[in-house]
Image (cartoon, grey):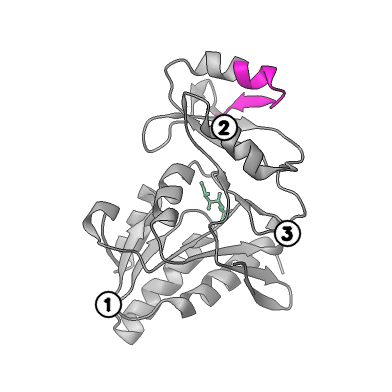
Amino acid sequence: MNQDALKKMVGQEAVKYIHDGMVVGLGTGSTVKYLVEALGKKVKKDKIHIVGVPTSHRTAERARRLGIKIKNINDVDHIDLTIDGADQIDRNFQGIKGGGIAHLIEKIVAINSKKNIWIVDESKMTKYLGSFPLPLEVIPYGSTQLFRRLAKMDFHPTFRMNGDQHVLTHSNNYIIDLHLGKIKHPHKLSRKLDDMTGIVEHGLFLDIVNMVIVGYDNGPKTIKAR
Ligand SMILES: O=C[C@H](O)[C@H](O)[C@H](O)COP(=O)(O)O
């Protein structure tokens, strides 16, 4: 089965956890695309009422087009469940997100959710985080100085570019990717990055996910994380 088929499989599996009356955070990315498609079908077929809280313009547009009612996070009083993709998940169910520049909004939605489920194909499961570059959303002002500090710390930073233009996030910030290879102590790294002025949010998602649905050739596997 190719990677896209595995993504579709977990997207369809995850929709089983969405029930009538729920407020659901909707993540971003090529895996969540399949979740939103399956949810659109479920809403129509079962005539259930759910409210989606999207984490990007892309997800918002797709959901709206498929007839899913959506609301801004500021207009809901709680989020029952958020379902999102991930770029990497380690053996302790810590994750890296932000490959698609959405991690700031995704983290705000995730920490305000009663429960979080991640949906991934098997290639995202790893022993250590870090072979996937760790994204930082940074304030453009002074970002060159921040970049130099990160380079001095041996974090091997690169600006995320589109040709000669900086890629801009939803909040008009830049992205710096850290090429770390292996992150042995994610909590320590997270605290270090939290302390650096100019970084709005990093892509380490620690102690957040409750359940992971992994797509394998022989079917989806649901794993309780915490
Ligand atoms: O910024 C993007 C998000 O964190 C995505 O959830 C993550 O990049 C996974 O995306 P995909 O399902 O496309 O691999």
Q: Position of residue 39 (x, y in %)?
A: 41, 73
| Residue position marked by numbered label 1 in the rendering | 49
* Residue nearer the viewer, 158 or 93: 93
- Give the SS element for disc 1: loop
Residue at (30, 73) in percent of width and height: 50
Q: Position of residue 68 (x, y in %)?
A: 30, 68
Q: Quadrant of the C terminus?
A: bottom right
Amino acid bearing label 1: His
- Give the SS element for disc 2: helix
Observer-side mark, 1 or 3, equals 3
| Residue position marked by numbered label 2 in the rendering | 193
In the rendered structure, the answer to whether residue 198 lies left or right of residue 43 reads: right
In the rendered structure, the answer to whether residue 7 lies left or right of residue 167 reads: right
Amino acid bearing label 3: Arg
Is 159 a magenta residue? yes
Q: Quadrant of the N terminus?
A: bottom right
Quadrant housing residue 6:
bottom right
* Residue nearer the viewer, 82 or 65: 82
Quadrant housing residue 154:
top right
Q: CA distance from mark 2 to mark 1?
A: 40 Å
Residue found farthest to the bottom:
46
Nearest to N terminus: mark 1 or mark 3: 1
Residue at (62, 25) in percent of width and height: 158
Count of numbered circles in the view: 3
Q: Position of residue 86 (x, y in %)?
A: 58, 54
Look at the image and give the residue range highlighted in magenta.
149-160
Give me the disc on residue 91.
Answer: 3
Quadrant housing residue 75:
bottom left
Amino acid bearing label 2: Leu
Nearest to N terminus: mark 3 or mark 2: 3
- Give the SS element for disc 3: loop
Nearest to N terminus: mark 2 or mark 1: 1
